[in-house]
Image (tube, rainbow, N blue to C red):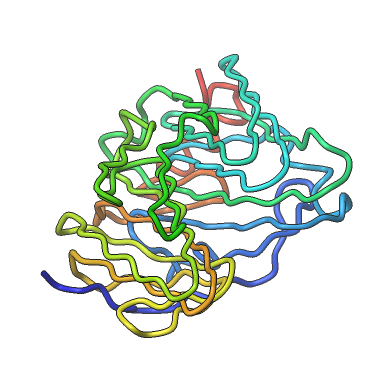
Amino acid sequence: MTEYTVKRVIRAIDSSDGAGVRLRRSLGQGGNTRIDPFLMLDMFSSDSPDDYIAGFPAHPHRGFETVTYMLDGVMRHRDHLGHEGLLRPGGAQWMTAGRGVIHEEMPQQEQGLMRGFQLWVNLPAAEKMKPAAYQNIEPESVAETSDSRGNRIRVVAGELNFADQLLQGPVVGVSRSPLFADISLVGGSELVFDLPDGLAGFVYPFEGEALLAGAELETHAANELSSGNRLRLNAKEPARCLLVAGRPIGEPIAQYGPFVMNTAEEIEQALRDYRAGTLAS
């Protein structure tokens, strides 16, 4: 077995998106801050309504998947296909834009903490124009368990062996064999996971301080993983992080805002389709 180490650190920077939602963006600051197949990672976290109340009004996507994972607060998804989902703490949505989708994500609260992540996952050329799809993952559906020390794992997509259990995430039928896990460590603990060969990904600590293979991880940053197949996490004090991995695509990327294709010509076609009202038809 080969242990993962940190290959690169992509620090989150303050940014905003939607109608002015304040957030921290790590992946996706520029073309050199992607980790194939992952295009963007935002974390939003604020107890000030001014930072999130305007939400993400209706907007288009084509050519990739969007994943929203809620930690605190409530948000509602609606799209042009009639899908609707209420994202509650611990829940998620996995939306495959494919050929095209127009959706909105709007807060369902006027005060209190709103905290969560949005991840963009690229699609290979052969899947970019497939029909759009939507999976609403209720908090109770997320695979979750704790060990005798209180370390807790929640798996939204993919699978992990932990505490003599195989945790299988509820997300099905998506590209790149993704792993999306929320890992909470108690102080003084060590967790070891064996993963399939050939995955690329990152660990994003967002509470406390965690270590990978004995080296401290940077908090509020995407710590890109080297090649390997064994992940060893430690925490001197309580810590919490996302573990995200998937199979790289290795294709050229052309991106214009919410459209991610392989060539400039395909981007121009997406823009024409959107202006003509045929993006998602």
Residue depicted at x 86% and y 55% = 48
Q: Residue at x 29, y 71 (%)?
A: 232
Q: Quadrant of residue 174?
A: top left
Q: Nearer the viewer, residue 214 or 199?
A: 214
Image vertical order of residue 53 relative to residue 81, above or below = below
With respect to residue 56, does 22 lie above or below? Answer: below
Count all numbered tags in the image, as a single digit: 0
Farthest left residue in view: 1
Q: Is 36 on the left or on the right of 79, as rendered?
A: left
Could you tell me which residue is drawn at 76 percent across and 42 percent down? 55
Question: Which of the 4 image quarters holds residue 189?
Answer: bottom left
Q: Is residue 248 above or below residue 111?
A: below
- Could you say where residue 61 lies in the image, as x and y percent from the top left? 54, 37
Q: Position of residue 94 (x, y in %)?
A: 47, 35
The quarter of the picture where residue 111 lies is top right
Q: Residue furthest bottom?
A: 215
23 sits to left or right of 38: right
Query: Which residue is at the front of the view, 63 or 265?
Result: 63
Residue 71 image point, x, y percent: 62, 48
Q: Residue furthest front?
A: 148
Residue 16's x, y, as percent?
Answer: 72, 59
Q: Nearer the viewer, residue 62 or 265?
A: 62
203 up-or-down from 150: above or below? below
Residue positioned 49% across, 64% down in the render: 27
If the image is split into quadrants, where does the N terminus sit? Answer: bottom left
